[in-house]
Image (spheres, rainbow, N blue to C red):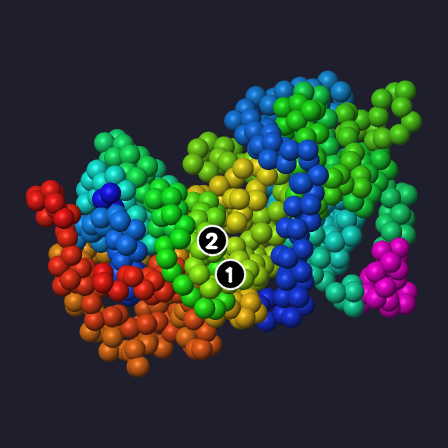
């Protein structure tokens, strides 16, 4: 588990100087929204399809406790073993226990953000069970020990030269190559060997269907299908919000997810598993464990102002639309989840007091809210965190107390035009004493950040209040008295 | 028709000419603009920073000052959005204030929206020889869904050629406290906006959000002093001859 949320600003600075990241981000932020647009417009009625998807996610979360019970009952009826994990420790212990009891020394894993969140790989490896990621992007980030750059494409930004070097080091290739096809083929062969002797595989879950007990995965590489069909023991790990009421709902969400994620009408592979292999079936795992991870999410469910975070389907559309993600990429967010969805989810998982930069690094532009296929209002949640942070810390430190007092003074001035105008008259000469040729170019205190790239006009001699008064234009209060103009 | 002007604090303190322009345009369009001199700030900076108790105080003052005015018009989308979309929630635990907030939200208009949708006017009589381009401010475009209206006003300016700004709906990187809290990211964003503006070859970048204007014009003044950005109200007023009497 990578958790470097405290390094947001410095990582962002470094990433803005990284030419490769910048070139890639430019391409992503221009290309991905267009791909999505093309994908969405392939619905006969895109607006209706989007509204239906939002309605499904709203229903799924409003009925969450009941749907989880229904899912568990139906999955068990089909032979799956369902395990509840209250937190990351319980989830990790369950997986390790399954592996140890079966004498397993290595497992493969395919694209699961929740296992990244709970730090499953580190736990298994340190307890003697080797873990091999199988999603190409995750193979690369695992070998480079790097956090995911994007929730959908964790290594999208890594250039072929770097991939070649690390593959060479790990014995995936014998000769260096920057040919993507050769790199892909080499990692495929490397993985096939792991799958051939596989006893236990781990996958995430895109949708868990309450009605049928089915788990659904969407992907484009086929590695998840290999993970699901090769081993004797399959462990599917899902966070609680993955459940949807019916198969029809799930299929609509698959269509929505594919389009929002990669602009595809449907991903290359969609696999559905309802229980383990039946006695009369040839393929599939003999045992299926489904671990349902809470890890702070029932807190989110109970917290009505932020509950809608759970509607997220991890499509990544908000990352591609965010103008800030487009400048800094995924690393500064410092955790499994980046971009707007990370900015709203991470503070609940890691604590508001530790994630200030995540919910402050936002202009409230609303691009995420507009694009979100689950109908999440990210800016409102960000504003809610800011308010909670201020409420929690206003008496704590000297600077927090000072800022709180400053805000109180401003609000007092805002509630009296006499005070307001008096404040203006007092501040203006001080403020303008910093100006040269009518512009301020730097400030020894306060809003220094403004002046790193911008000037600020000095305050004009007269405010609008004063101009209005001087022009002796009609005052509505006088108008009210005279009833004329 | 009586129109109550809500002049945002940024305009009052830093760019009062925008307020004068709004007055001139609205008088010219045969409305009767009035200005409550008791007004101050809608409280948006406090609200966005998380100071809700303090923002409530500003909100209650705003509601008191504007009372039951039928049309409250402002040259700022983010201020209108604050009153229209956030006051009721902010004052949720004070039922009588919350009702008043809900009520006032129905009477709030962004300037271009008011002129086009309420007055039904798209041509204010301005002429300008040259190329202009338009930045879609976040709170005007996404929060209030206003885009057609300013574009119609610009398209009706005689002689003016409206060229499309690349990535016009992308945020300019202001975001109030964001611009000072995350200066490097903010700079990268405003720089992209400036580059897109310069690439259009337009003479003027038009927008109708004072916050964006402070940011973009401040950046241009430092880095491209020959390039001009203007509030749509100022642009229309400056280029309409008949206004000179106002």
Where residue A375 sits: x, y (%)? 54, 37
Say few, some or many: other residues with alpha carbon within 10 Å of mark 1 (under 14 / 14 to 19 / 20 or more): many
Image: magenta residue range: A164-186
Say whether residue B12 is left or right of residue A2: left
Say whether residue A447 is left or right of residue A226: left
Q: Is residue A389 visible?
A: no
Q: Which chain hosts label 2?
A: B
Q: Badge 2 is on which residue?
A: B151
Residue A173 lies in the magenta-colored region: yes
Residue A328 lies in the magenta-colored region: no
Q: Secondary structure at mark 1?
A: strand
Q: Is residue B164 visible?
A: yes
Where residue B165 sits: x, y (%)? 54, 61
Q: Secondary structure at mark 2?
A: helix
Residue at 79% from the left image edge and 34% from the top image edge: A271
Along the viewing direction, whichever of A80 and A449 lies nearer the viewer: A449
User: Cα distance, mark 1 to mark 2?
Assistant: 8 Å
Q: Badge 1 is on which residue?
A: B162
Q: Which chain hosts label 1?
A: B
Q: Is residue B108 above or below residue B168?
A: above
Residue at 52% from the left image edge and 39% from the top image edge: A376
Along the viewing direction, whichever of A190 and A254 lies nearer the viewer: A254
Residue at 58% from the left image edge and 52% from the top image edge: A321
**Residue placed furthest toward the bottom:** A436
Along the viewing direction, whichever of A68 and A481 lies nearer the viewer: A481
């Amino acid at each position: 588990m990578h958790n470097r949320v405290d390094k947001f600003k410095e990582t962002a600075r470094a990433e803005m100087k990284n030419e490769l990241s910048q070139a890639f981000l430019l391409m992503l932020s221009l290309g991905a929204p267009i791909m999505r647009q093309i994908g969405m417009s392939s619905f006969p009625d895109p607006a209706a399809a989007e509204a239906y998807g939002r309605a499904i996610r709203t229903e799924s979360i409003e009925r969450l406790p009941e749907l989880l019970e229904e899912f568990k009952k139906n999955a068990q009826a089909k032979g799956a073993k369902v395990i509840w994990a209250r937190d990351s420790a319980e989830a990790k212990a369950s997986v390790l226990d399954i592996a140890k009891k079966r004498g397993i020394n290595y497992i493969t894993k395919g694209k699961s953000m929740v296992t990244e969140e709970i730090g499953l790989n580190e736990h298994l490896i340190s307890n003697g069970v080797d873990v091999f990621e199988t999603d190409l992007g995750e193979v690369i980030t695992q070998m480079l020990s790097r956090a995911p750059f994007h929730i959908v494409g964790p290594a999208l930004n890594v250039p072929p030269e770097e991939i070649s070097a690390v593959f060479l080091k790990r014995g995936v290739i014998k000769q260096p190559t920057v040919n993507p096809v050769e790199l892909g083929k080499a990692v495929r062969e490397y993985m096939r060997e792991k799958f051939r002797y596989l006893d236990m595989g781990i996958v995430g879950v895109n949708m868990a269907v309450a009605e049928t007990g089915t788990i659904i995965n969407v992907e484009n590489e086929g590695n998840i299908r290999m993970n699901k069909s090769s081993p004797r023991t399959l462990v599917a790990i899902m966070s609680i919000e993955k459940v949807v009421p019916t198969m029809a709902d799930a299929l609509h969400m698959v269509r929505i997810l594919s389009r929002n994620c990669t602009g595809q009408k449907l991903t290359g592979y969609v696999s559905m598993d309802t229980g383990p292999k039946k006695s009369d079936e040839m393929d599939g795992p003999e045992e299926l464990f489904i671990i349902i991870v809470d890890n702070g999410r029932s807190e989110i469910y109970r917290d009505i102002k932020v509950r809608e975070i759970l509607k997220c389907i991890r499509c990544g559309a908000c990352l591609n639309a965010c103008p800030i993600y487009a400048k800094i990429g995924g690393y500064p967010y410092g955790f499994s989840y980046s971009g707007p969805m990370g900015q709203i989810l991470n503070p609940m998982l890691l604590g508001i007091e530790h994630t200030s930069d995540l919910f402050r690094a936002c202009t409230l532009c609303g691009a995420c809210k507009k694009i979100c296929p689950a109908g999440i209002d990210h800016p409102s949640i960000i504003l809610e965190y800011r308010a909670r942070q201020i409420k929690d810390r206003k008496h704590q430190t000297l600077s927090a107390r000072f800022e709180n007092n400053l805000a109180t003074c401003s609000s007092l001035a805002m509630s009296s035009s006499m005070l307001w105008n008096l404040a203006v008259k007092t501040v203006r000469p001080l403020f303008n004493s910093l100006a040269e040729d009518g512009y301020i170019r730097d400030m020894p205190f306060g809003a220094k950040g403004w002046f790193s790239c911008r000037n600020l006009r000095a305050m004009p001699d007269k405010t609008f209040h004063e101009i209005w008064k001087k022009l002796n234009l009609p005052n509505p209060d006088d108008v009210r008295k005279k009833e004329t103009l | 028709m009586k129109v109550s002007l809500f002049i945002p604090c940024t305009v009052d303190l830093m760019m009062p000419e925008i307020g004068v322009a709004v007055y001139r345009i609205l008088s010219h369009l045969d409305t009767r603009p009035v200005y409550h001199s008791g007004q101050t700030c809608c409280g948006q900076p406090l609200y966005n920073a998380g100071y809700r108790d303090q923002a409530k105080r500003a909100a209650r003052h705003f509601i008191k000052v504007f009372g039951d005015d039928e049309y409250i018009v402002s040259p700022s989308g983010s201020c209108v959005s604050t009153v229209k979309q956030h006051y009721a929630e902010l004052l949720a635990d004070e039922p009588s204030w919350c009702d008043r907030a809900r009520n006032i939200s129905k009477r709030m208009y962004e300037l271009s929206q008011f002129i086009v949708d309420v007055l039904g006017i798209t041509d204010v009589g301005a002429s300008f020889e040259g190329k202009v381009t338009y930045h879609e401010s976040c709170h005007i475009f996404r929060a209030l869904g206003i885009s057609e209206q300013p574009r119609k006003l610009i398209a009706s300016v005689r002689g003016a050629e409206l060229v499309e700004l690349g990535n016009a709906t992308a945020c300019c990187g202001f975001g109030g406290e964001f611009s000072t809290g995350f200066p490097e990211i903010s700079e990268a964003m405003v720089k992209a906006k400036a580059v897109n503006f310069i690439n259009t070859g337009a003479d003027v970048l038009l927008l109708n959000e004072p916050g964006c204007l402070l940011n973009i014009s401040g950046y241009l003044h430092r880095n491209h002093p020959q390039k001009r950005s203007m509030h749509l109200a100022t642009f229309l007023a400056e280029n309409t001859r008949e206004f000179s009497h106002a």
